[in-house]
Image (cartoon, helix red, strand yellow):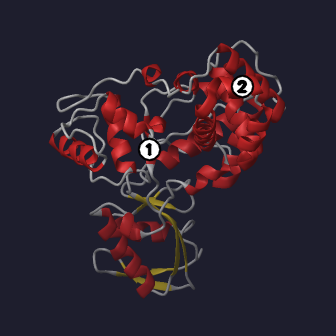
Amino acid sequence: MAFNINALKLPVIQRGSTGASVGAWQRFLQDRNFAIGAVDNGFGSVTDKVTKDYQQKNGLVADGVVGRGTYAKALSQGFIYRVSDLTAAMLLSYLNYGAAETQDLQRSLNAIGRLNPPLTIDGNFGFGSTKGLTEAYKILDVNFRPRLDAQLSNATKQKLGADYAPGLAILTEYARRQRARLSGAQWVRFFPASSSIDDLASPFRQRVRAFEKALRDGGASIAVTNTYRPPQRAYMMHYAVQLNNRDMAPWDVPPMVGIDIDWVHYTDAASYQAARDMVNAFDIGGNPAALQSRHTQALAIDWIISWKAPMRIRNGNGQTVTIGTPTDGNDNPNLWDVGATYGVYKLEYDPPHWSVDGF
């Protein structure tokens, strides 16, 4: 028996092809360390050359056409996880699970994950069953595969034969990847914000550097807490707060290109708890971060400025100005005026925030 490649409905792609299937192929080539360049969903000359290189190195006909033979080899190397629009039901069909085996899997997931509510044993592995699979992996982690192996019936194992063990490995890795997509505190590690002035956009970066030098020459102490915030991070912060405040439902959060996060957990309670965990991990309050801001444009800096009064500082016009109390950049309008001469403007209601235009 062999896996059912027809279940994946893979289109033949070659030079001139476009679309998600091409992007999936390009990402697979990246995974295999081929110099594909940018993933642009277009099968151009670079993708054609790299495809031929891949085919040659794997003993295939190096014609640049990604058809059944090339797909079969790639699937054995992990392309299955890159298949465009892959669903769990498609995956199970590829692994030769029929209705009886799928029902056995649903029963097994209920047992090993103690799923509440339990999956319906209907042989239809849809959205709910996929979430149940992910939840079981979330609960069991590295114990998922041995527990599932022990729970699945002998009938399923006999039906699948030699394909059972490799199929179980593929199913486990699929479940692990689905679990990794779930929202939660772990996402704070991804798309980190910068606290480096070097990451600001020019010419704002040079203006901040000039103002910084004047501050330090005047004896001020400076601690930069945030400069550039990737749009993906702003997106996570924004919707984590929205969910935590119950201002929207997890399934209504719009997707964002470039971040493969799944806000919908097995239960609504788990979805909202994950959002709460993210809010705590990001250390943000109850107001959603702006999806687009001067921070996401690299045109703002959050910094703490303090000094011992009086501070004599040169402004952007070359004049020396004396700054007294309060000795905190968040609260001293006279320092704000100095910053403005450098093109660095204070946002009055946001204590540490300065930007290219005061917003």
What secondary structure is found at the residue carrying circle 1? Answer: loop
Query: What residue do we see at 61% from left, 25% from top?
Result: 251
Label 1 crowd (10 A; few <14 / some 14-19 / many >=20): few
Q: Position of residue 194 (x, y in %)?
A: 47, 63
When the figure is inspected, residue 278 is found, relative to residue 83, above or below; the finding is below
The residue that disc 1 covers is 77
Q: Secondary structure at mark 2?
A: helix
Q: Position of residue 124 (x, y in %)?
A: 65, 14
Between 172 and 290, the one lying in front of the other is 172
Classify residue 354 by image quadrant: bottom left
Where is 95 relative to 306, above or below? above
Mark pair 1, 2: CA separation: 25 Å
Image mark for residue 277: none
The mark nearer the N terminus, 1 or 2, is 1
| Residue at figure coordinates x 22%, y 35% from the top left | 43
Q: Nearer the viewer, residue 129 or 279?
A: 129
144 sits to left or right of 164: right
Callout count: 2
Which of the two residues, 170 or 45, is positioned nearer the viewer here? 170
Q: Is residue 227 above or below residue 69?
A: below
Pinpoint residue 38: horizontal percent, then vertical percent: 28, 47
What residue do we see at 83% from left, 27% from top?
116
Badge 2 density bin: few <14, some 14–19, many ≥20, Cα 10 Å: many
Which quarter of the picture shows residue 321?
A: bottom left
Q: Is residue 342 visible?
A: no
Do the residues under discs 1 and 2 have CB atoms within 8 angstroms? no
The amino acid type, in three-letter code, at marker 2 is Leu
Three-letter code, disc 1: Gln
The image quadrant of residue 68 is top left
Q: Position of residue 9 (x, y in %)?
A: 40, 20
According to the picture, the residue beneath numbered tag 2 turns out to be 105
User: Relative to 223, is 115 on the left or the right?
Assistant: right
